[in-house]
Image: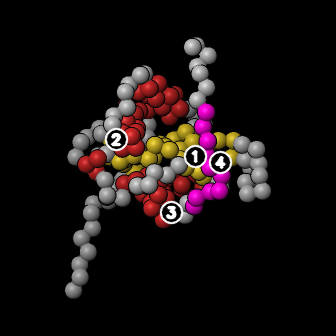
């Protein structure tokens, strides 16, 4: 006879302003996993904190974060996924022009391979559905692509491009 041993139920919740510092910390973890080293702090951490503080407390939020609390460290987060709603011109596949964008999907190094990112992204997709969003975009790392594919994401034919404009202050 086979008996399944279930892990304790993991609570996924919407982040609050009190989670801003941990969301910034997990962003650093995510950036380090992409580049192989901790990014230098040229003020990005404070700027990210300030943005999260303002946007997470908004009455009509267009940016939310879904988190899982770290099971062994009170006050710390194990994982997160952040999403925003953008408004674009309509197209044949999106008659409202509203689109979701998922970013900053990150899991603390000691908490990986437990399904936390899947829980966060799934909850974020539910939030989009509840807000009438029918198109959701993201950029996937090679490590994250299997998760996103399993949730129904597909590669698009239009490759992303980016331009960094100089700051008006320089």
Q: Are marks 1 and 4 in contact (CB under 8 Å)?
A: yes
Callout 2: SS: loop
User: Residues under labels 3 and 2: Cα distance?
Assistant: 24 Å
At 38% from the left edge and 25% from the top edge, which residue is drawn?
Answer: 41
Check residue 119 for magenta coloring: no
Q: Where is residue 110 shown, x and y percent of the image? A: 25, 48
Please report the bounds of the magenta region as a residue range: 154-163
Counting residues from the start of the chain, the first of labels 1 and 2 encountered is 2
| Residue toward you, 161 or 12 | 161
Say which mark, if any, is on residue 101.
1
Say which mark, if any, is on residue 149.
3
User: Residues under labels 3 and 1: Cα distance?
Assistant: 16 Å
**What residue did someone put label 2 on?**
36
In front: label 3 or label 4: 3
**Crowd around label 1: few <14 · some 14–19 · many ≥20 (10 Å):** some
Q: Are marks 3 and 1 in contact (CB under 8 Å)?
A: no
């Amino acid at each position: 006879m086979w008996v399944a041993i279930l892990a304790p139920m993991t609570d996924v919740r919407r982040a609050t302003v009190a989670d801003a510092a941990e969301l910034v910390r997990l962003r650093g973890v995510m950036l380090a996993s992409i580049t192989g080293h901790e990014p230098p702090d040229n003020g990005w951490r404070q700027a990210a904190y300030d943005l999260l503080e303002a946007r997470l407390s908004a009455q009509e939020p267009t940016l939310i974060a879904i988190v899982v609390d770290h099971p062994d460290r009170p006050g710390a987060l194990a994982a997160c996924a952040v999403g925003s709603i953008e408004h674009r011109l309509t197209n044949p596949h999106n008659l409202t022009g509203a689109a979701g964008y998922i970013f900053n999907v990150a899991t603390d190094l000691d908490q990986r391979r437990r399904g936390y990112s899947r829980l966060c992204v799934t909850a974020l997709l539910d939030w989009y559905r509840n807000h009438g969003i029918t198109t959701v975009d993201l950029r996937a790392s090679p490590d994250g692509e299997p998760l996103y594919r399993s949730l129904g994401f597909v590669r698009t034919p239009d490759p992303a491009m980016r331009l960094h404009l100089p700051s008006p202050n320089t």
